[in-house]
Image: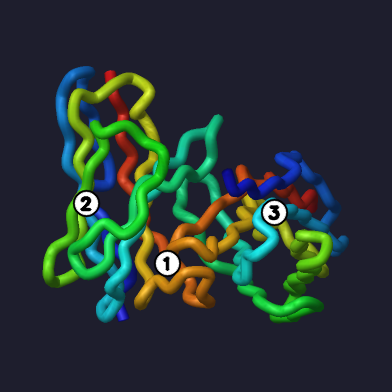
């Protein structure tokens, strides 16, 4: 079974621009979560989507948004990019994503975003 | 604010030794705990999951969970240079499918 895929793998943008990242979960997985990883902050939860609905949201500004399609593929968008948005953006999928559940989240390879 | 705390390290052990990685969490009702390994420049990959108090062994890896003390650990026996990586502790919140990650412990196994 194919793993989680993310595109693009690398991206360079300038301040003020916007960016869209894409994630395709493992086949059959319906929950998709997004994380931002920086050396100083570690893995920070952005949001989780299930059945095309945002089910959980982390503590990030409204410039960060996402959506999920009927085939469970997900996109995240960052508008008005800032230098501090430079990070590795990771997508993770799980089957149903139950609260406190025993399902594992499987990570994609990530998109490395550099904002200049 | 649910928190997961790990010693950032770096932790260095000689090849063949036991590496011990520790993690504490603040949410007393958390039920599911995971250890991920992340090589430099790569994404996290699951090593172990544990849900019940006690020990769980998988090859050279043993996860230990003590819910009363809100403590979870990972032991790596017969450490190999290929084990050199950052190890992330994760807790699945009971209030939504939200994983909380520690900042990771950097492990170096010296040949």
The residue identified by callout 2 is A7
**Residue on which the image places disc 3:** B25
Determine which quarter of the picture holds residue B69: bottom right
Mark 2 and mark 1 lie on one chain; the one further toward the N terminus is: 2
* Distance of label 3 from label 2 (alpha carbons): 33 Å
* Chain of the residue under label 3: B
Tell me which residue sits at (12%, 70%) in the image: A70
The answer to whether residue A42 of the structure is visible from this angle is yes
Instruction: Choose mark 1 or mark 3, whichever is in front.
Output: 3
Mark 1 touches mark 3? (CB < 8 Å)? no
Q: Chain of mark 2?
A: A
Q: In the rendering, at what x and y percent does residue B71 appear?
A: 78, 60
Q: Given the image, what chain letter belongs to the residue carrying mark 1?
A: A
| Residue B107 in picture, x, y percent from top left | 72, 49
Residue at the image position 22 percent from the left and 18 percent from the top: A15
Element marked by disc 3 = strand
Q: Residues within 10 Å of mark 2 (few under 14, many from 20)?
A: some
Examine the image and state in which quarter residue A37 appears.
Answer: top left
Number of marks in the rendered image:
3
Residue B99: where, in percent of width, then height?
Answer: 50, 58
Q: Tell me the SS state at disc 2.
A: strand
Residue A25 vertical placement versus A83 (above, below): below
Q: Residues within 10 Å of mark 3 (few under 14, many from 20)?
A: many
Residue shown at 37% from the left, 46% from the top: A46
Give the CA separation, mark 1 to mark 3. Answer: 21 Å
On the image, the x and y values in percent for residue A43 come to 50, 45
Q: Residues within 10 Å of mark 1 (few under 14, many from 20)?
A: many
Asked if labels 1 and 3 share a chain, the reply is no
Q: Which residue matches tag 1?
A: A106
């Amino acid at each position: 079974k194919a793993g989680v895929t993310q595109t693009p793998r690398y991206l360079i943008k300038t301040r003020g621009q916007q960016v869209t990242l894409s994630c395709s979960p493992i086949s059959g997985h319906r929950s998709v979560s997004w994380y931002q990883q920086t050396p100083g902050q570690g893995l920070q939860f952005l949001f989780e989507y299930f059945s095309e609905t945002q089910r959980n949201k982390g503590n990030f500004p409204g410039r960060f948004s996402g959506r999920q399609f009927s085939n469970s593929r997900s996109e995240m968008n960052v508008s008005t990019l800032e230098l501090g948005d430079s990070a590795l953006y990771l997508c993770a999928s799980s089957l149903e994503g139950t609260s406190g559940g025993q399902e594992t989240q499987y990570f994609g390879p990530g998109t490395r975003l550099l904002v200049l | 604010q649910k928190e997961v705390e790990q010693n950032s390290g770096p932790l260095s052990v000689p090849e063949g030794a036991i590496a011990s990685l520790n993690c504490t969490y603040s949410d007393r009702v958390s039920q599911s705990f995971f250890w991920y390994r992340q090589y430099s420049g790569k994404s996290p990959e699951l090593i172990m999951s544990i849900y019940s108090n006690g020990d769980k062994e998988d090859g050279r890896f043993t996860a230990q969970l003590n819910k009363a003390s809100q403590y979870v650990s990972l032991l790596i026996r017969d450490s190999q240079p290929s084990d050199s990586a950052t190890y992330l502790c994760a807790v699945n919140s009971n209030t939504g499918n939200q994983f909380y990650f520690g900042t990771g412990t950097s492990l170096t196994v010296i040949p």
